[in-house]
Image (spheres, rainbow, N blue to C red):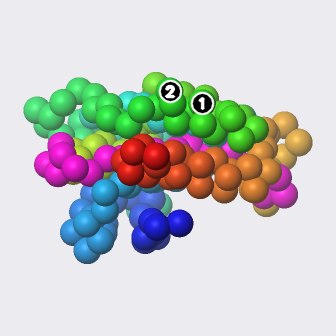
Amino acid sequence: EGVDVALAQMPVSFGRVAAALRGEVEHHRPDLIVMLGQSASADCVKLERVALNMMDSAAGDNDGYTPNEEPISKGGEVALLTTLPIKSLRSAIEAVGVRVKISNSAGLYVCNRLYYEALRLCNEHPSMQAIFIHLPLYEGHPSAKSDKPTLPLGDMILAVQTLIKEIYDKKRGV
């Protein structure tokens, strides 16, 4: 309530994701960027604290690009951290009964590239904040196998809603 939300799907492309994000930020001028990605190995909601200045993928992205330990930004910061109160966000999500943890690595795939670019934009626009959330497969997901962890889709939605509410309640001083 009282929060305008704009949604955008980003390309799973090391080469195209930065421009796509920048275009959305210029168009919407958000206070907060909440990015969601899927991690088939995750067993709960993962709040990512850190984005690394590194790209690496043996499997490649949707364009077939396979970076091999390449920096995102030559001469850029080795790592960027969210400025959001990640521990209190975790506590708020736990309080609504959703499994959640803090992760100190967004990996080296396109999710990490997207997060690094978002945090760089936050450095350019200090009033803007960002967080990346890795979500597990949802129960009933076509890729979900009996050996893969899942989480109910409703729990993931509740976690994201709780995170946004917590951030905006703090901004409003509630």
Residue 112: give x, y in percent of width and height. 40, 42
Q: Is residue 106 above or below residue 141?
A: above
Q: In the drawing, what numbered circle is on residue 144?
A: none
Residue 91: give x, y in percent of width and height. 60, 30
Q: Which residue is mark 1?
A: 91
Q: Are the residues tagged 1 and 2 within 8 Å (C-beta)?
A: yes
Is residue 136 rendered magenta in the image?
A: yes
Q: Name the residue: 31% across, 47% down.
A: 129
**Residue 58 visible at all:** yes
Q: Residues within 10 Å of mark 2 (few under 14, many from 20)?
A: few
**Residue 59 visible at all:** no
Q: Residues within 10 Å of mark 1 (few under 14, many from 20)?
A: some
Nearest the viewer among 94 and 8 is: 94
Is residue 51 rendered magenta in the image?
A: no
Nearest the viewer among 107 and 115 is: 115
Q: Is residue 84 above or below residue 25?
A: above
Indicate the quadrant where residue 148 lies: top right
Q: Name the residue: 67% across, 52% down.
A: 158
Q: Name the residue: 45% across, 65% down.
A: 3
Q: In the drawing, what numbered circle is on residue 87?
A: 2
Q: Which residues are magenta?
A: 123-141
Q: Amino acid at mark 1?
A: Ser
Indicate the quadrant where residue 143 lies: bottom right
Residue 94: give x, y in percent of width and height. 67, 33
Q: Name the residue: 84% across, 37% down.
A: 147
Under circle 1, the secondary element is: helix
Side (left or right) of 85 relative to 118: right
